[in-house]
Image (tube, rainbow, N blue to C red):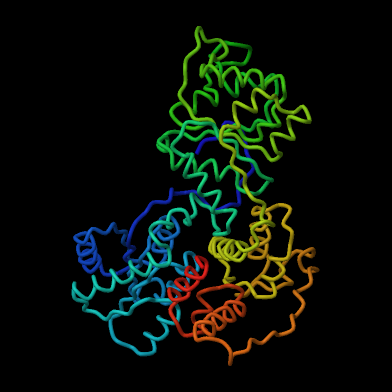
Amino acid sequence: MTSAAATEPSFDLDPTLPPSDYDILIVEDTASMRTIYEAHMRRAGYRTLATGTAGEALELFRAHRVSVVLLDLMLPDRDGLDLLIDLLDVRPSTSVVVVAAERSTERTVSAIRRGALDYLVKPVSETRLMEAVEAAQRAANLAHPPHSKQARTPVGDFVGHSAPMLEVYETIRACARSMAPVCIIGENGTGKEMAAQAIHRLSDRAQGPFITLDCGALTSDRFETEVFGHRRGAFAGAVNDRLGAAELADGGTLFLDEICDLPLALQTKLLRFLQTGQVHPLGAEAARRVNLRILAATSITPEEAMRRGQLRSDLYYRLMVVPLRMPPLRNRPEDIPLLADTFLHRFSALEGRGLNTIAPETMARLKAHNWPGNVRELANVVRAATVLHEGDMVLPDMLPKALQDIPSAAPVAENRPDFESMTLAELERAAIEAALGRHDGAVQRAAADLGVAPSTLYRKLDTWRQD
């Protein structure tokens, strides 16, 4: 990604690779076995990724979307059971089939309790292997049915499954292949540039450049050069040709960040460019037409900016073809645990620290905070904890003082259900909801507590949501 103006470093999820859809990730340290497994899978029509180490497996898993993992427990760099936990922490609805060199009751039980769907012992026949993989694929489809799978899957590098974020994903997918301008509206730290990147990646221009122009940093004396460029000798000091943001974005996407901060006098020039699609660099003999997609973003609502006289109405109507409103983190609190865990594992690996769990009382404070800085603030809080503290669990005293002072939720008087009057289905639901409550909504831990596979809970939860 190229930027025409300096931008603030992002602490959002690392967009190093675009997400791609694969069916199966094969994690097997023996090259010959990897080749055999891949051949079986591909004959059956599955799209595969394969690796021989736990480290690379986790990187591939985070960068790509797979529904099934075939996991060998004996890996050269890490125990497969530990990797199993990390994989399901990143994407809990994944179906994992474990492959081991020998049958071990203890290891089998441990793998199933940690979320594995099946446990195979080498040597595995092609018939047995494909039966397990097909069952895993069916379980993955039950967790995310085909008709709703795409709508519920995050786009780009977003994390979260709350209703506000599902609307964001739906809008991004709907507008990505259009040429219509999109105006992304949201508070600072909500992921406006990530949304723009996601639209670009899903568009027909994904192979073209993505250029960011910081409108708040543009002044009258810099506008022409930054946007349209100049030719050598156009003015004193112009010793070389320079391409502006508009030419750099030719064939791709131009992202106008903080469009409402652009001075009114410069909005007229920008509007003229948007109307004609032509750039005329300073010192050039003629203008040339460029072919690009326009995306814009603002941290204040365009309607409010027009009322304040900060945004021209004609520019507003030019850019507000498709509005995309990013929800503040306080409006999606159910996403906080997943975001916090994702940041914790990412920053602990980056900083070489051992923190891998957030204590329940710490998570309670994170969920109770108002997060004026949104996702970026949450990322900074988690990163500070990994930099400044040792251990394996994030405790309340590792948080900033303002979050330490947030009181834990007051204990609620226990309201015991009348078990004798409940049906079997009602008892089952009560047990599952109680387990989820004990583990702060963590499906993997709740499933282990109940002694069932996580896919069982996902199926139940999906059924209840549809009721």
Name of the residue lying farthest toward the bottom: 420
Residue 250: percent from the left, percent from the top? 46, 26
Q: Quadrant of residue 125?
A: bottom left
Q: Residue furthest top?
A: 285
Residue 117 relative to residue 284: left or right: left
User: 292 or 123, which is in the foreground?
Assistant: 292
Snapshot quadrant of residue 334? bottom right
Picture layout, residue 317 above or below residue 333? above
Seen at 56% across and 36% down, the residue is 322
Counting from the top left corner in percent of width and height, residue 145 is at 40, 62
Compare residues 360 and 332 and report the one nearer the observer.
332
Residue sitting at x 77%, y 77%: 410
**Total marks in image:** 0
Looking at the image, residue 21 sits to the left or right of residue 383; the answer is left
Q: Position of residue 406 (x, y in %)?
A: 78, 68
Where is residue 79? Give x, y as percent.
41, 76
Indicate whether 108 appears above or below 17: below
314 or 295, which is in the foreground?
314
The quadrant where residue 52 appears:
bottom left
User: Residue 418, relative to residue 57: is it above or below?
Assistant: below
Q: Which of 355/269 is in front?
A: 269
Please name the residue shown 58% across and 57% down the image: 163
